Amino acid sequence: MGLSGLDSTFTLIPDDGTGTPTGQPVAGAGYEEWQGLIGHLGVLVRPDVRLRGLGAYAGAIAMEEAFTEGLIPQWRAALGNAGAQRVAASLGFELAGSQTTVLFNQ
């Protein structure tokens, strides 16, 4: 998921306990607006801090912002991507369909 190409992005940077940022992002999320109706969400978490809820936290921020902009949040992930499926479930998404892509070599 390339966050840099999304319309709105959010970054989680921990602090040192006194409120001073450490400067090292741990997670990010955002959404891309589709047709003025859908907010397609994306989340990235640094590999060494996964499984701590940071993806769900960042995703919840992006989801709330999409709602605030009047968009319907959407999540797409490969069926075999267990991490993405866990984050989606923690945000309240449910499987609603599948997508197949066919590429033709010419």
Image (spheres, rainbow, N blue to C red):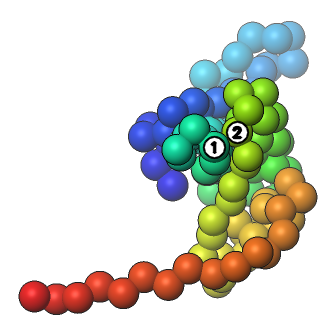
Q: Give the labeled residue for mark 1.
A: 37
Check disc 1 and give the amino acid type.
Leu
Q: Nearer the viewer, residue 5 or 55?
A: 5
Q: Residues within 10 Å of mark 2 (few under 14, many from 20)?
A: many
Task: Count the labels in the image.
Answer: 2
For the residues bearing labels 2 and 1, Cβ distance under 8 angstroms: yes
Question: In this picture, is 36 found above or below 95?
Answer: above
Quarter occupied by residue 16: top right
Q: Which residue is pictured at 67% across the width and 21% down the height?
A: 22
Q: Which residue is mark 2?
A: 71
Give the image location of residue 100, x and y in percent.
Answer: 50, 84
Residue 19 against residue 65 in the figure, above or below: above
Name which residue lies at 70% across and 66% down: 84
Which element is circle 2 on? loop
Q: Quadrant of residue 24?
A: top right
Across and down, in percent, residue 87 comes to 79, 60
Residue in view at x 60 percent, y 76 percent: 78
Horizontal relation, residue 82 to residue 43: left or right: right
Q: Position of residue 7 (x, y in %)?
A: 51, 33
Q: Earlier in the sequence, mark 2 or mark 1?
A: 1
